[in-house]
Amino acid sequence: MCKLAFAGFAARVARDESGIAAAEFALIMPVLMFFAVSALELGSEFNDFLLITNAAEAGVFQLTISRGAGTPYSSTVAAVKNSTSLSSSQLAQLTITVNVNGTGWCRESGWNLKVA
């Protein structure tokens, strides 16, 4: 009699499909979260890439048009800083290096540029 009761219980449990959706969700959720977080991180990295590219473009343009001016280095640095959407604390941490043909430019004094 005990075997018969257990067999009936086992048959009911085998046919019961409640909870399958929860188990499938528990299996697939980590994968979905991975893709969602990866998409957000990729978007952030792409935004940083565009910010740096636009700042470099503004700096190159300013250096190109102000080579004969009195302060090409300062004008270039100002153009780079003005083209970004960074806060003032982030701009304070920004390091800008101006290189022309592999040669670094230092701050100018009047018309003279120190070429390293």
Image: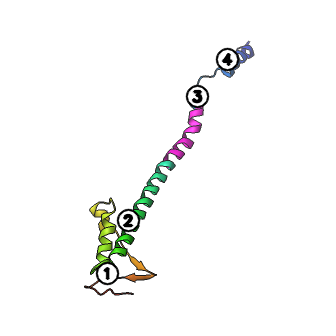
Identify residue type, mark 1: Gly
Q: Amino acid at mark 3?
A: Ala
The image position of residue 100, as x and y in percent, is 42, 80
Residue 28 position, x and y percent, is: 58, 38
Give the foreground label among 4 and 1.
1
> Which region of the structure is painted magenta?
23-37
- Residue at x-position 71% and y-position 18%: 11
Q: Which residue is mark 4?
A: 12
Which residue is situated farthest in the left direction here? 110
Q: Position of residue 90 (x, y in %)?
A: 32, 63
Visible residue check, residue 22: yes
Relative to 22, is 61 on the left or the right? left
Q: Residues within 10 Å of mark 1 (few under 14, many from 20)?
A: few
In magenta segment, residue 31? yes
Q: Compare marks 4 and 1 and give the one earlier in the sequence.
A: 4
Residue at figure coordinates x 38%, y 76% from the top left: 97
Whichever of callouts 2 and 4 sits on the residue coming sooner in the sequence is 4
Q: Which residue is mark 1?
A: 68
Quadrant (top left/top right/bottom left/bottom right) for the C terminus: bottom left
> Alpha-carbon distance for marks 3 and 1?
71 Å
What amino acid is found at the position of numbered circle 2 in the picture? Ala
Q: Quadrant of residue 48?
A: bottom left
Tag 1–tag 2 contact (CB < 8 Å): no
